[in-house]
Image (cartoon, rainbow, N blue to C red):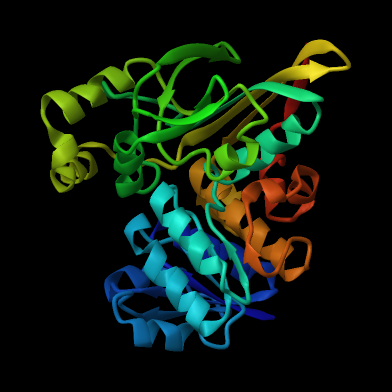
Amino acid sequence: MKDIVVIGAGKIGSTIARMLAHSGDYRVCVADRSAEQLQQVEKHDAVSTAVVDIADRKALVALLSGKFAVLSAAPFHLTVAIAEAAAEAEIHYLDLTEDVESTRQVKAIAAEARTAFIPQCGLAPGFISIVANDLSRHFDTLESVRMRVGALPQYPSNALNYNLTWSTDGVINEYIEPCEAIVEGSLIEVPAMEEREEFSLDGVTYEAFNTSGGLGTLCETLKGKVRTLNYKTIRYPGHAAIFKALLNDLGLRHRREVLKDILENALPTTTQDVVVIFVTVSGFREGRLVQETYANKVYSGVVAGRMQSGIQITTAGSICAVLDMLAEGKIPTKGFVRQEDIALDTFLANRFGHYYAQKHETERAAS
């Protein structure tokens, strides 16, 4: 059995610990600064807990030393501190951050590391890049790569058509920070929540708009190889207009703690959600312009004996799959590892990656 530390005892961190412990191949220590939060972690023979403040570098390194890997499910602003401690302890590092600047710093840390540093191992960034890169390999030359992902309530019941399904800090960050994109072959930054579009899938109409971080390192990987590359978050129609009013007209983009407090006290959480994944790639193959699409929906369900939301299943399942592949030597075990370095077939064949294909068939339509 391999010893793992999971930083963060929230919804995703607890789900990661449960998945790994129930696999029978991992012993997991869940660390958090909140003893109260740690009390909510499911009791299991393969799960222990530790109260640790990430700011206490010495205590964190001591906790990590001798372990196989640390998985960060902590807020994005703690990413770099955890990565630095992992490098000092000489263990593997994986995280779920969507923050672009944090990932750049993790890459710099990885340059001198003796172990693997694999950021952005969630749904988006994460799995979405694995899918997009896999589709891109089917073309002689690329024209466009369009990536769309959203975690939505199955039964929306408020004006925002939204429920809290994951980190409030993460949602606010991706709605505010600049977004990377490739436009007419050039890597640029575009504003969040702009370039709204509508599309339909399975008879349901959605809107999508720019958000930060979802592309991971794919812009850098495909720079010079594609004309258009962008990532947008999927919501139900009407969400963007209201949220832009909160951020811009009411100035809450400059008062994030106030916005966080409003959202967490006004929007209920739900486990009855659906994760929508929609990736479309077009390009030339044998002289013809061709398009391929990956479309998938993942719903909430029972995992490791407990009902989990779709976003918990996809996010935790993804990082657990990457850890599993790392433990099996199926991905690089040293240096900076990009999500697009992981083969889609290998990911989906993994016991944790299989959650993406377990209930709902993935369709690839070529036209």
229 relative to 295 in the view: left or right: left
Vertical placement of residue 173 versus 47, above or below: above
Residue at screen point 36% across, 39% down: 174
Vertical placement of residue 367 versus 342, above or below: above
293 relative to 37 in the view: left or right: right
Q: How many marks?
A: 0
Residue at screen point 32% across, 39% down: 177
Q: Quadrant of the N terminus?
A: bottom right
Residue at screen point 46% across, 69% down: 83
Residue 314: give x, y in percent of width and height.
57, 46
Q: Is residue 151 visible?
A: no
Residue 229: give x, y in percent of width and height.
57, 27
246 relative to 152 in the view: left or right: left
Residue 38: give x, y in percent of width and height.
36, 72
Residue at screen point 36% across, 49% down: 167
Q: Quadrant of the C terminus?
A: top right
Which image quarter: residue 156?
top left
270 relative to 341 in the view: left or right: left
Which image quarter: residue 209?
top left
Which image quarter: residue 139?
top right
Q: Residue furthest right?
A: 286
Residue 354: give x, y in percent of width and height.
72, 48
Vertical placement of residue 162 versus 334, above or below: above
Viewer-proximal residue among 75 and 11 = 75
Viewer-proximal residue among 326 and 85 = 85
Q: Is residue 15 visible?
A: yes
